[in-house]
């Protein structure tokens, strides 16, 4: 089979957390195809990595945006931050299509990951039209591709109909923007050869029920990660020593990057830890906190030791931290991932979390962790306690289960193969 030119679009730099997700698809695809990843801006100099903006253009763009924020912020349309509604008016083009054409090879396939602040559906339609309507695949990493603009819909079901009365937009006179965006995007999507690939079965179900994609092809593929970085090292004692964690303690890992962020549900983690302490059934426990948040301020009376390692941007270092833990706990209450669940399991560390996002697909009760009913902190505590009660041999079995599942189901090579199966299947049915 001839090598195909695959264009991957990602507004995020390939060195950023979200950009790496797209990059981890690009790398294995590039081994068998001519893959390019187009970003809004990156300093990475690597074959197949293309920056839309030069460094000087990027500097001027950011300076312009800061001036707009400074002098015209009062004119912005106010949105409820919990919905992550950023691009309020999607009728405006964000890029110069001719400039894009000059920077990329003629694609046979377009895969769009993150487009916020970069492409709109309208822009994507115009790019596709430049290349004889080559197939487009949207990768659903949150809900923005099926809504009128919000990345997280919470309990709103407007995406199933027309997004009228949008709760994300504060003022009544501006609420029409969500409905306008949805209608505009539907008009373009209905005319496009476009498919959607969800990264969790939860989002697959959302997409199938959406007004935008209920008549389009929707597929489900687990997002791949680099197992050369995130893997089970079987070196827990050495890693504990290196990070000043007592070697005989049971280690609970918790990510507290933004402790005040509503959808991260930090209060449920606090409640779960307080339940464990109150019952006096656990001792020799250390909570390892990563991120900018100070977890000790939220647990002033805990009997558990707390070690705050701060924000970790280096993925090799992050993989070591997963490996030193006995359990990774996330209490996010609105998410398509989080990707930290995939990373932790790949490192052999079981996960305790709510039954949400990708956890529904890879957290298997008793094998790779435990899922709790949404908002039920006591069940989170019970899941932690079940892992705490395991003997050394049983804990090792769970860790090996985790690592095996990652290798079989979502290494970046496996994930890329699953993407290609969907693409090849669609080509055969055309």
Image (cartoon, helix red, strand yellow):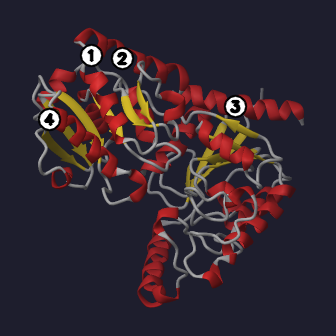
Q: Residue at x 62, y 65 (%)?
A: 149
Where is residue 306 drawn, in percent x and y?
Answer: 14, 42
Q: Quadrant of residue 92?
A: bottom right
Q: Residue at x 13, y 43 (%)?
A: 302
In front: 310, or 6? Answer: 310
Tell me whether circle 1 and circle 3 mark residues in contact (CB < 8 Å): no
> Given this view, does label 1 or label 3 mark the residue nearer the observer?
1
Q: Tell which circle, 2 or 1, labels the residue nearer the N-terminal end.
A: 1
Q: Which residue is mark 2?
A: 398
Q: For marks 4 and 1, give the CA distance.
A: 24 Å
Q: Tell which circle, 4 or 1, labels the residue nearer the N-terminal end.
A: 4
Q: Which residue is mark 1?
A: 390
> Given this view, does label 2 or label 1 mark the residue nearer the observer?
1
Q: Tell which circle, 4 or 2, labels the residue nearer the N-terminal end.
A: 4
Q: Tell which circle, 1 or 3, labels the residue nearer the N-terminal end.
A: 1
Q: For marks 1 and 3, give the CA distance.
A: 40 Å
Q: Which residue is mark 3?
A: 420
Q: Is residue 117 left or right of residue 44?
A: right
The correct choice, above or below, for 112 with respect to 391 in the image is: below
In front: 11, or 308? Answer: 308
Extreme right residue here?
Answer: 430
Q: For marks 4 and 2, give the CA distance.
A: 23 Å
Q: Tell which circle, 3 or 4, labels the residue nearer the N-terminal end.
A: 4
Mark 2 Cα shell of 10 Å, populated few (<14), some (14-19), many (≥20) = many
* SS for callout 3: helix
> Given this view, does label 3 or label 2 mark the residue nearer the observer?
2
Where is residue 250 drawn, in percent x and y?
Answer: 19, 27
Tell me whether circle 2 and circle 1 mark residues in contact (CB < 8 Å): yes
Extreme top residue here?
Answer: 393
Q: Residue at x 42, y 51 (%)?
A: 16
Q: Which residue is mark 4?
A: 243
């Amino acid at each position: 089979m001839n090598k195909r030119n695959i264009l991957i679009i990602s507004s995020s730099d390939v060195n950023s957390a979200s950009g790496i997700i797209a990059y981890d698809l690009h790398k294995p695809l590039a081994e068998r195809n001519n893959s390019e990843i187009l970003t809004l801006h990156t300093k990475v100099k690597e074959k197949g990595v293309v920056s839309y903006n030069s460094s000087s253009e990027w500097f001027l763009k950011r300076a312009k945006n800061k001036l707009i924020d400074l002098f015209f912020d009062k004119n912005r349309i106010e949105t409820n931050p919990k919905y992550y509604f950023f691009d309020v008016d999607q009728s405006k083009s964000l890029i110069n299509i001719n400039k894009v054409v000059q920077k990329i090879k003629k694609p046979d396939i377009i895969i769009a990951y993150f487009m916020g602040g970069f492409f709109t559906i309208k822009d994507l339609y115009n790019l596709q039209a430049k290349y004889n309507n080559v197939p487009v695949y949207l990768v659903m990493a949150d809900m923005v591709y099926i809504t009128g603009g919000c990345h997280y819909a919470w309990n709103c079901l407007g995406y199933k109909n027309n997004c009228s009365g949008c709760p994300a937009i504060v003022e009544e006179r501006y609420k029409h923007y969500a409905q306008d965006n949805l209608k505009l995007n539907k008009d373009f999507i209905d005319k496009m050869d476009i498919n959607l690939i969800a990264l969790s079965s939860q989002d697959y179900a959302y997409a199938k029920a959406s007004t935008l994609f209920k008549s389009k092809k929707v597929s489900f593929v687990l997002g791949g990660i680099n197992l050369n970085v995130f893997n089970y090292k079987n070196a827990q004692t050495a890693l504990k020593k290196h990070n000043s964690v007592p070697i005989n303690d049971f280690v609970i890992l918790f990510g507290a990057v933004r402790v005040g962020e509503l959808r991260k549900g930090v209060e449920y983690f606090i409640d779960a830890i307080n339940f464990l302490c109150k019952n006096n059934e656990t001792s020799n426990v250390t909570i390892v906190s990563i991120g900018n948040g100070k977890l000790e301020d939220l647990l002033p009376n805990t009997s558990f030791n707390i070690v705050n390692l701060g924000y970790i941007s280096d993925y090799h270092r992050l993989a070591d931290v997963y490996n030193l833990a006995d359990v990774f706990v996330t209490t996010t209450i609105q998410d398509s991932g989080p990707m930290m669940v995939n990373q932790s399991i790949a490192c052999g560390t079981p996960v305790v979390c709510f039954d949400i996002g990708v956890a529904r697909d890879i957290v298997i009760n008793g094998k790779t962790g435990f899922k709790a009913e949404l908002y039920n902190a006591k069940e989170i505590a019970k899941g932690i306690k079940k892992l705490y009660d395991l003997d050394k041999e049983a804990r090792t079995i769970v860790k090996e289960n985790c690592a095996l599942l990652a290798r079989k189901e979502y290494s970046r090579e496996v994930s890329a193969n699953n993407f290609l199966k969907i693409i090849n299947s669609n080509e055969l049915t055309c």
